[in-house]
Amino acid sequence: MKDEGARYFRFLPAVSLRSSILALCLILFSCTASAQYRFPMPEFSSGYHRPETNAPQGRLTSSAVDVVLLTGGMALTAWLVIRMRSRSGVLLMAVFSIVYFGFYRKGCICPVGSLQNVLNAFMGGHVPVPLIVSLFFLLPLIFALYFGRVFCAAVCPLGAIQEICAVKPVQLPMAAEMTLGMFAYAYLGLTVLGVATGAGFLICRFDPFIGFYRQGGSFNMLLAGGLLLLSGVFIARPYCRFLCPYGVLLRWASLFSRWHAAITPAECIQCRLCEESCPYNAIRMPTPEDRPENRRTGARRLARLLLITPAVVVFAAYVGFASHRFVARIHPTVWLAERVASVERGAADDSPIDTEAFRSGRESPAELYAQAEGVRQRFKTGTALFGGFMGLALCGRLIRLSVVRTADDYEPDRAACVSCARCFAYCPVEKKDAAS
């Protein structure tokens, strides 16, 4: 009875936190509106003809079908991973996501990009978030709270295409994994900063795979996507692990998942065959009997990390504040002002269409410079908060690493695990159950 009570009280905080996150998602959903604004196209008298866009045209019926398929795809993936333990089923689901959500729907509507729309509405933007976009943003997070990152496993077209390309993945050293993973937090912080300061939607601007799905795009973005897929042959899912800002939110939600993929379907026999099976470093090893340190030593290290966290956050905030002029270049106004200034100094030519369009307008360079300086001032607070966030994320990762958890079996790291089902085939208990 004592063990049952202890297990209950250990489980209670996770349930309360999961319920709190779910309630926060519902509140966020209620803050978004379902209306969409439409603006008339400007009239040009210079003979300009608007080119045909390669962005998909949204329809209410097709968007409703997208929500149904998204929900059904995640439910099916959760069943395949948790109940059926089928790697082949996950791969088939990934192929479907690439075909439908990727090439047919051309990467839209995407939960990764919907993060920006929700942030814009939450920060008081003038354009409300459509209901479909809100659902695409919230549903993968809700599923992660209960089943882990099943959206990443096979439903996300960005992750699915990388999973298919990862034919000979290798494990990175854990130090490299943790260091490169900080770029995803930086991308998330810059995404929030871009929306808050009016710099634009950075995720959509620098989506490395949208050019493939829409069969068009700039050479630089196609090259970036190609390099990511090429490197993904050996370093599995580089975008998902080291860049995806939405993946950071899914990591946080998956930590408290009610159900999750298990490495073995029954009791672990400690065969160690799964140790090298996960290319995402998402398998936690059992705690050795002769632990290198006692609990008191770990507690002291944790206390030191907690004590220095405020200083690290303040220092990182100062670094962010000091770099506001450089970071402000992500804003189109600042970029254009610096480009025009370079042309006036003779350091660059006047060939880009942006500077040519500015020259043909009525605004003077002095007015443009004043607007750019106003934007830089707005970036001061934003970059300070961005730096503080990065400092807090760094300390959080160090604190999580410093906590020595007691584990008897090989267990998945719920934050890092993308429920790809790769480890199932390495378990002899799995093969024994299948044979019987």
Image: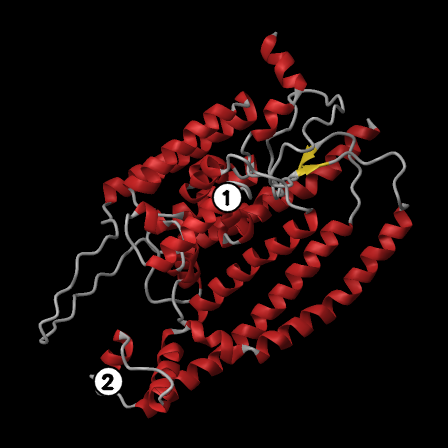
For the point 33% across and 86% down, the residue is 343
Label of residue 232 in the image: 1
Image quarter for residue 427?
A: top right
Cα–Cα gap, marks 2 and 1: 44 Å
Badge 1: residue crowd in 10 Å (few <14, some 14–19, many ≥20): many
Expressed as whole percent of the image width and height from the top left, the position of residue 183 reads 56, 58
Q: Quadrant of residue 91?
A: top left
Where 43 falls versus 122 (above or below)?
below
> As drawn, is 250 to the left or to the right of 428?
left
**Sequence-wise first label, 2 or 1:** 1
Q: Is residue 401 left or right of residue 367?
A: right
Residue 51, picture quadrant: bottom left
The residue located at (50%, 37%) in the rendering is 166
**Residue type at mark 1?**
Gly
- Secondary structure of the residue carrying tag 1 is loop
Which quadrant holds the C terminus? top right
Return the residue nearer the eye: 344 or 384: 344
The residue singled out by tag 2 in the image is 359
* Of residues 122 and 330, the one drawn nearer to the viewer in this rendering: 330
Whether residue 131 is visible here, answered yes or no, is: no
Location of residue 256 in the rendering, given as x and y in whole percent from the top left corner: 62, 42
- As helix, strand or loop, the secondary structure at mark 2 comes to helix
Of tags 2 and 1, which is closer to the observer?
Answer: 1
Find residue 162 and report its horizontal and vertical position in percent.
Answer: 46, 41
Figure quadrant of the N terminus:
top right
Residue 69 falls left or right of residue 378: left
- As drawn, the label of residue 165 is none
Q: Tag 2: residue type?
A: Arg
Could you tell whether 8 is left or right of 108 in the image?
Answer: right
